[in-house]
Image: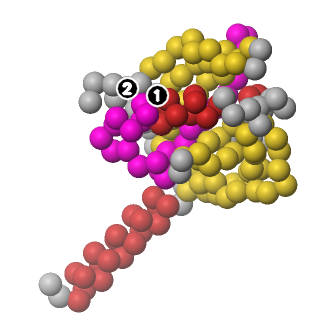
């Protein structure tokens, strides 16, 4: 190859990589401490489910905890780091077995979590209407929390067949 071809190819690859990374953003969110240790059993079941998947890399996945406003059940879902669109206001986080656990504001309960003064830098993507959303299914777990106990209401693990 001549130098001009190499230069054009290198420039083209640089432009493509810059466009891909341009959507990646960072946000600082507060770290949480887990007050109710029963939540670790639930997280263990989520991690065990995800470990069945062929491309399991814990550092590239987030576990989200949210709370349904109607049933007051806690919903745990697993998503890939590069698919996170919005972390919401006043969300918190903690690390569990190399997974970043994001607790949405609606699920932060003083019986379960304690706010800390520490903050963590978290990767997320901004919304871009030119990129179609990925329809990859997420694992989903729904738990009720009553009398300081979690009760499983629903479980969907997409990699159960592996």
Q: Position of residue 6 (x, y in %)?
A: 25, 82
Q: Position of residue 93 (x, y in %)?
A: 69, 45
Query: Which residue is depicted at the point 49% across and 45% down?
Result: 61
Report the number of numbered marks: 2
Magenta residue check for 67:
yes
Relative vertical location of residue 92 with respect to residue 19 in this rendering, above or below: above
Span colored in magenta = 48-72
Magenta residue check for 81:
no
Instruction: Using a 10 Å C-alpha cutoff, classify the residue at mark 2 as few (fewer than 14 neighbours), some (14 to 19) or many (20 or more).
Output: some
Q: Position of residue 10 (x, y in %)?
A: 32, 77
Relative vertical location of residue 126 with respect to residue 162 in this rendering, above or below: below
Instruction: Using a 10 Å C-alpha cutoff, classify the residue at mark 1 as few (fewer than 14 neighbours), some (14 to 19) or many (20 or more).
Output: some
In terms of depth relative to the viewer, which is nearer, 89 or 9?
A: 89
Residue for badge 1: 139
Residue for badge 2: 158
Of callouts 2 and 1, the N-terminal one: 1
In terms of depth relative to the viewer, which is nearer, 61 or 151?
A: 151
Q: Position of residue 31 (x, y in %)?
A: 74, 50
Judged from this view, the residue extending furthest toward the bottom is: 3
9 horizontally vs 36: left or right: left
Tell me the tag on residue 38: none
74 horizontally vs 12: left or right: right
Would you say residue 26 is visible in this rendering? yes
Query: Which residue is depicted at the point 42% across and 65% down?
Result: 17
Label 2 SS: loop
User: Looking at the rendering, in which quadrant would you find the C terminus?
Assistant: top left
Q: Are marks 2 and 1 in contact (CB under 8 Å)?
A: yes
Query: Which residue is depicted at the point 70% across and 23% down?
Result: 67
Would you say residue 135 is visible in this rendering? no
Colour pattern:
secondary structure
Query: Which residue is depicted at the point 76% across and 28% down?
Result: 106
């Amino acid at each position: 190859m001549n130098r001009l071809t190499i230069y054009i190819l290198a420039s083209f690859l640089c432009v493509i990589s810059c466009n891909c990374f341009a959507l990646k953003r960072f946000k600082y969110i507060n770290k949480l401490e887990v007050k109710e240790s029963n939540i670790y059993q639930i997280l263990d079941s989520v991690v065990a489910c995800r470990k069945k998947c062929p491309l399991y890399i814990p550092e590239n996945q987030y576990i989200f905890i949210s709370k349904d406003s109607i049933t007051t059940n806690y919903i745990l879902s697993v998503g890939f780091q590069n698919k996170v669109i919005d972390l919401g206001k006043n969300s918190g986080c903690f690390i569990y077995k190399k997974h970043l656990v994001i607790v949405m504001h609606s699920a932060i309960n003083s019986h379960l979590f304690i706010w800390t003064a520490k903050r963590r830098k978290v990767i997320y993507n901004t919304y871009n209407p030119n990129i179609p959303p990925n329809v990859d299914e997420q694992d989903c777990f729904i738990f009720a929390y009553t009398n300081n106990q979690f009760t499983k209401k629903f479980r969907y693990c997409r990699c159960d067949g592996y």
